[in-house]
């Protein structure tokens, strides 16, 4: 099995863009502000395991529950939609269980190992060999771990007002991503001239 550096880099960049851990910093800070302890290693490992499962047995695994990829993506889009509403409107929809494991949802799933990243892994299998994808995925998980660990630093740099602005901006972006993911998997189209 021949491994090419350029393919590893491509896999890394595609997954980095889809996972978008840096864009999730305001969400992570918001979850921590609610008193939830974010265990960086645990969240990273859960997300990594979910992605590995999907990489090797994703479609057959969902098939056991008679769930197709589109339905799975729609479910993920709805979770993202409600998280985004919380961020933009300053309301609490998801009641966090104040335990160490509470950060697994929504951090490990659907923010890190979300419908987009899981389906992307399956798509990458058609173009690249498994080892190249695994290396790209592992490098992304290292980045995820360090970003989760460094959110306190980002919080100090940005301050309360900076975090509030980021939270609203990324909340709107997350809302748009959730709607796009929903529409893409339901086959619905927004007319180009809709106002």
Image: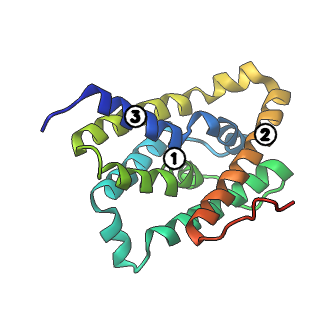
Q: Secondary structure at mark 1?
A: helix
For label 1, count other residues whose C-alpha is less than 10 Å away and answer few (under 14), some (14-19) or many (20+).
many
Where does label 2 land, which residue?
169
Label of residue 19 in the image: none
Residue at position x 76%, y 23% in the image = 158
For label 3, count other residues whose C-alpha is less than 10 Å away and answer few (under 14), some (14-19) or many (20+).
many
Residue 74 vs residue 95, the one in the foreground: 74
Residue 163 vs residue 54, the one in the foreground: 54
Image coordinates of residue 134 in percent, x first then y, are: 29, 41
Residue at position x 71%, y 52% in the image = 176
Give the mark, 2 or 3, whose residue is nearer the N terminus. 3
Residue sitting at the far top: 157
Image coordinates of residue 70 in percent, x first then y, are: 50, 69
Where does label 3 land, which residue?
12
Question: Would residue 121 be found to the left or right of residue 76 on screen?
Answer: left
Where does label 1 land, which residue?
112
């Amino acid at each position: 099995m021949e491994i090419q550096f350029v393919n590893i880099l491509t896999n890394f960049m595609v997954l980095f863009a889809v996972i978008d851990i840096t864009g999730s910093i305001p969400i992570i800070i918001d979850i921590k502000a609610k008193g939830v302890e974010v265990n960086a290693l645990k969240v990273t490992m859960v997300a990594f395991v979910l992605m590995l499962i999907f990489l090797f047995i994703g479609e057959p695994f969902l098939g056991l529950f008679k769930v197709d990829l589109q339905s799975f993506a729609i479910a993920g889009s709805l979770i993202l939609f409600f998280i985004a509403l919380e961020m933009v409107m300053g309301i609490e929809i998801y009641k966090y269980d104040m335990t160490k494991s509470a950060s697994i949802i929504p951090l490990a799933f659907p923010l890190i190992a979300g419908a987009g990243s899981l389906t992307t892994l399956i798509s990458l299998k058609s173009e690249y060999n498994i080892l190249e994808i695994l290396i790209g995925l592992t490098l992304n998980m290292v980045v995820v771990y360090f970003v989760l660990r460094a959110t306190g630093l980002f919080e100090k740099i940005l301050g309360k007002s900076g975090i509030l602005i980021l939270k609203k901006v990324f909340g709107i972006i997350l809302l748009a991503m959730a709607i796009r993911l929903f529409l893409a998997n339901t086959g619905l189209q927004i007319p180009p001239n809709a106002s």
